Image (cartoon, grey):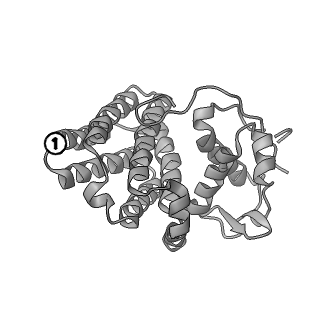
Amino acid sequence: MASFDRAGGGVDDYSYGKKGGRGMGFETIRKSTAPEMVVEQILEKIEKGELEPGGQLPSQRELAQLFGVGRSSVREATNALVVMGYLEVTQGRGTFIRKDLPGGGPSTDRLQNALAAGNIFDLMEARELLECKSCRLAAERAEESRIQAMEAALQKAVATAEDDYPAFLDADLQFHYALAEATHNAVICEMMKLLIEKVLDHHARLRTRYLSSNFRSFSIDTAARVIESVRAGDGGEAAEWMRRHLNAINEELKTIIPGGRDRAQSAG
């Protein structure tokens, strides 16, 4: 059986406009990166063969105790791993490692099916984990030309933020795609495109009243900070700014979908 280390406490998470196991061998992690790091460490155990295809994971309660994190962090991580094609949930039985594990990444068909099954908040959780990891990889791997592509997208966002919402949205998407490309990981690039496209398609109103003017300003600021951190090689700082950026999107979603996640779940 794979071994996990308990996670430690640490930096608080951030939200829009404010600061928001035993014997099993995982590293101590900060509270703000808990879901992301739970994903990383489970994937590491799968890749090393310590968690085998078809094997069952402990319950969310047990995993939370083993990692030393909240159940919400475990739930967020396992939801993302389902979307990524590594786990599957069997009603009444539990969560299992898929027998047909991705060979370098989930197949497009399987990923599309998983995306279709999730509500918009599930998609945003998976997107947060993927983009924060992308920030860390980009800080390690991005050459100057990739960083300049991110800057070019940001400059377009600045130029269109006040009076051309569709162009601003397109520039914002190009920034996120450029970040994915800076990881030099083809699977991440494909998953990023599919996730973002699905978020936009999930709710038609996103294209017309998704980002408030207040958010647009916040988005530009956080994107600039991400770029600055990536250029400095500080993946942790870049991921933290990305987390703030995406948390702000969730706040915008709550204004569009009254009741938030509960309403989205009931809407299917």
**Amino acid at the residue labelled 1:** Glu
Image: 131 above or below 9? below
In front of the other: 133 or 62: 62
Q: Position of residue 261 (x, y in %)?
A: 53, 56
What residue is rendered at 61% in x and 50% in y? Answer: 76
Q: Mark 1 sits on what residue?
A: 162
Instruction: Give the structural element (helix, strand or loop) at label 1.
Output: loop
Q: Is residue 42 left or right of residue 25?
A: left
State the count of labels: 1
Q: Residues within 10 Å of mark 1 (few under 14, many from 20)?
A: few
Position of 67 relative to 83 (above/below): above
Q: Is residue 94 left or right of residue 47?
A: right
Q: Position of residue 127 (x, y in %)?
A: 48, 52
Which is nearer the eye, 92 or 63?
Answer: 92
**Where does residue 55 sit, x and y in percent of width and height?**
79, 62
Q: Nearer the viewer, residue 158 or 84?
A: 158
| Residue 212, image quadrant | top left
